[in-house]
């Protein structure tokens, strides 16, 4: 009767894994051929990829780089590779790549977009990577003004006056808040800034410029184009729509009825209207409403519209993150005595934004690709330029080469964003 | 060791003139149309340890969550150290910084290290310099016996360790009153003791405590008073001795037989 029950007498030691674990064949068997369905899918997929490459590679490499027109291209390819070969005419890229990058920006001033781009990378570095010195953040704050001045040129005094007013406002923010309260201070500062921009900057600028003319040659907005234009609209839109989106998302979850109604109204309006409609509003309707004689820069208008559009989507993504956060996090920060803004900044948003990273980056990638829509209102982004290039009799009828080039450039940018978001998710992982 | 006692002011003048920690008078609260707290009257003096127990859904958690305004009451008054809880946000923040709270599910901030969890509120609410706040945090982490985990994230700790960090986090604000909302209910059995030991130590130092708990051994050992709640009201209020040995209401008899009977 003493046989019931079980007592282990010796413990089982750890053993090596079965033979195929960790070898190539083992991996293939586990991942590609582990069932009949999976094996069939693997075969079909590999065949399809092989077929596409078999078509694409000869087209891409039996090509012409030196011709000056599409007709010449075809002659060169026939002469070089045989009668019935149809190869790519990359010559159009060689001839027009500067235009695709810079648009109609004056050729002797290409250093300015170049420098702006390099400085942009420097300004973004401390924002994107925590290992970069925090002191660079000051440069990041100054960068938008510097970048604007480098790209558009003109007198330095205009930018300097704007920066001076903002710096003063920033410096006075906390004493004014202590005196008048947050809401009145913010409204006052925004009002003062707008009035300053509208009425004080222009006369003061011409005054100072008369005394000490310092500046760069001005480049008007209609000379901007190509990837420079896409990057300006895309990056400005991305950088500006994140904080705006956060505010809309917080507004939508606010206890205050008015704030909540405005946020909901804005977000639903933005999401219910196609971007193209809003771009048309920016390009045509806005001029009707503005007082006659005011020239409101078209790129600026487009940037504002794209930013507002994107912020609506970002807001909804962030709202998802806020809702996903356990209610205990809000309660714990309340219980510690953190006020609303501190609790949002220190406890809630860091976690909510982390949850929302994939969605936010998707919105940003979407925004960057949507910048191609500006070609519809006449701005010469890469797609707009591809039409312009085709309008040239030498390149009439060329399609694939231009689109492949534009696609590769866009892919590089968007893929980089996607990889960065994955890196960020890994970096913020704290094991819970 | 006596710092908390002295701060509470209870040690020096005990028995002569007791200071009020919490006074709740004729308080009522509804969730929608559901009358969740009914005519609550409760006075807690500084240095007192109160254990609140009762069947689930009896309003115990809601009651202590009203004390730091995580829940809003609709009728009656709640005074915390003579400050009345109303919709005045300044008063609410003031009270919250004086009242520490420990939750059933810890509610540590997972994106911050243990040290940052403990220094966040002292730095941002109390405006204490970082190095000073870290020193305080180290002191309390040592007290809850996890000094060497300060740089880890909460997700890397066991449940019992997390709850002790949560206690340390609350203590770092140097609160005069501590609220515990079922602090051991989400823990594995072998981790309950380490948390209870920390709480007992805290009680022995004279901290004013209101604990919602089902740990009757803890109640017997440290409580000055046991409050039994059912259906949103205080049904019995007594010394632990009397409450456990000689419960007077039929509801508390039933409750005690159910939790002690197995």
Image: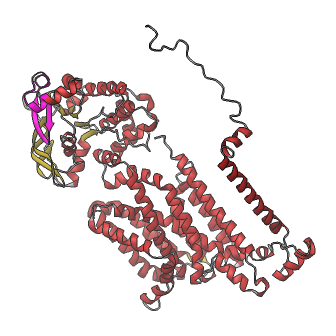
Residue B229 is covered by the magenta coloring: yes
Towards the viewer: B8 or A270: A270
Question: What is the span of residues highlighted in magenta in the rendered image?
Answer: B226-253
Q: Residue at x 23, y 32 (%)?
A: B213
Furthest residue in direction top, as rendered: A2
Rendered position, B231 above or below A280: above
Query: A342 left or right of A310?
Result: left
Q: Residue A71 placed where, x, y %?
A: 84, 82
Residue A263 visible somewhere in the drawing? yes
Q: Residue A148 placed where, x, y %?
A: 56, 72
The colour style of the image is secondary structure
Q: Residue at x 39, y 37 (%)?
A: B134
Q: Residue B82 placed where, x, y %?
A: 13, 44
Q: Residue at x 57, y 76 (%)?
A: A373
Furthest residue in direction front, as rendered: A1
Mark count: 0
């Amino acid at each position: 009767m003493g046989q019931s029950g079980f007592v282990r007498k010796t413990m089982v030691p750890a053993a090596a894994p079965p033979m195929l674990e960790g070898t190539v064949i083992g991996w293939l068997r586990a991942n590609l051929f582990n069932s009949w369905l999976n094996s069939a899918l693997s075969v079909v997929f590999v065949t399809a990829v092989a077929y596409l490459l078999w078509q694409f590679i000869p087209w891409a490499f039996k090509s012409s780089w030196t011709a000056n027109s599409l007709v010449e291209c075809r002659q060169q390819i026939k002469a070089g590779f045989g009668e019935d070969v149809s190869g790519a005419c990359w010559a159009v890229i060689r001839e027009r790549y500067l235009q695709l990058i810079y648009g109609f920006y004056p050729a002797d001033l290409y250093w300015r977009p170049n420098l702006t781009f390099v400085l942009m990378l420097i300004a973004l570095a401390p924002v994107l990577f925590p290992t970069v010195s925090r002191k660079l953040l000051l440069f990041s704050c100054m960068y938008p003004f510097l970048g604007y001045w480098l790209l558009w040129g003109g007198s330095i005094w205009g930018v300097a006056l704007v920066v001076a007013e903002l710096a003063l406002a920033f410096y006075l923010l906390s004493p004014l808040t202590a005196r008048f309260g947050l809401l009145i201070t913010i409204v006052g500062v925004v009002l003062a800034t707008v009035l300053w921009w509208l009425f004080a900057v222009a006369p003061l600028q011409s005054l100072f410029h008369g005394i000490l003319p310092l500046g760069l040659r001005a480049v008007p907005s209609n000379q901007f184009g190509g990837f420079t234009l896409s990057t300006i609209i895309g990056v400005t839109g991305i950088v500006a729509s994140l904080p705006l989106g956060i505010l809309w998302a917080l507004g939508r979850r606010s206890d205050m009825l008015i704030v909540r109604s405005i946020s909901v109204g804005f977000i639903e309006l933005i999401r219910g209207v196609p971007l193209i409609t809003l771009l048309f509003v920016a390009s045509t309707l806005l001029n009707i409403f503005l007082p006659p004689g005011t020239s409101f820069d078209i790129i600026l208008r487009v940037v504002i519209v794209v930013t507002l559009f994107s912020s609506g989507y970002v807001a909804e993504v962030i709202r998802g993150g806020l809702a996903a956060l356990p209610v205990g996090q809000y309660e714990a920060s309340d219980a510690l005595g953190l006020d609303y803004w501190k609790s949002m900044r220190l406890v809630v948003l860091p976690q909510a934004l982390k949850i929302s990273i994939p969605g936010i980056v998707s919105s940003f990638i979407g925004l960057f690709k949507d910048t191609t829509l500006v070609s519809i209102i006449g701005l010469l982004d890469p797609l707009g330029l591809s039409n312009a290039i085709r309008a040239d009799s030498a390149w009439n009828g060329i399609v694939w080469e231009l689109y492949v080039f534009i696609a590769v450039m866009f892919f590089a940018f968007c893929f980089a964003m996607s990889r960065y978001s994955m890196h960020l998710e890994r970096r913020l992982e704290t094991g819970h | 060791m006596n710092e908390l006692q002295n701060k509470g002011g209870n040690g020096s003048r005990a028995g002569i003139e007791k200071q009020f920690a919490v006074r709740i008078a004729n308080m009522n609260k509804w969730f929608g149309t559901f009358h969740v707290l009914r005519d609550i009257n409760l006075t807690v003096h500084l240095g007192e340890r109160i254990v609140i127990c009762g069947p689930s859904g009896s309003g115990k958690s809601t009651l202590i969550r009203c004390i730091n305004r995580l829940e809003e009451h609709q009728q009656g008054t709640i005074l915390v150290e003579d400050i009345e809880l109303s919709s005045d946000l300044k008063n609410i923040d003031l009270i919250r910084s004086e009242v520490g709270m420990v939750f059933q599910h810890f509610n540590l901030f997972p994106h911050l290290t243990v040290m940052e969890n403990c220094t966040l509120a002292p730095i941002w609410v109390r405006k204490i310099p970082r190095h000073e706040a870290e020193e305080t945090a180290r002191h309390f982490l040592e007290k809850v016996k996890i000094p060497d985990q300060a740089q880890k994230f909460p997700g890397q700790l066991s449940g019992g360790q997390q709850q002790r960090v949560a206690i340390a986090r609350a203590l770092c604000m140097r609160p005069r009153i501590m609220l515990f909302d079922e602090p051991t209910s989400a823990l594995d059995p072998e981790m309950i003791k380490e948390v209870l030991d920390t709480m007992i130590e805290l009680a022995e130092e004279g901290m004013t405590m209101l604990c919602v708990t089902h740990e009757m051994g803890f109640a017997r050992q440290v409580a000055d008073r046991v409050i039994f709640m059912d259906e949103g009201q205080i049904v019995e209020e007594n010394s632990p001795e009397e409450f456990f040995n000689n419960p007077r209401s039929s509801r508390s008899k039933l409750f005690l037989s159910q939790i002690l009977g197995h």
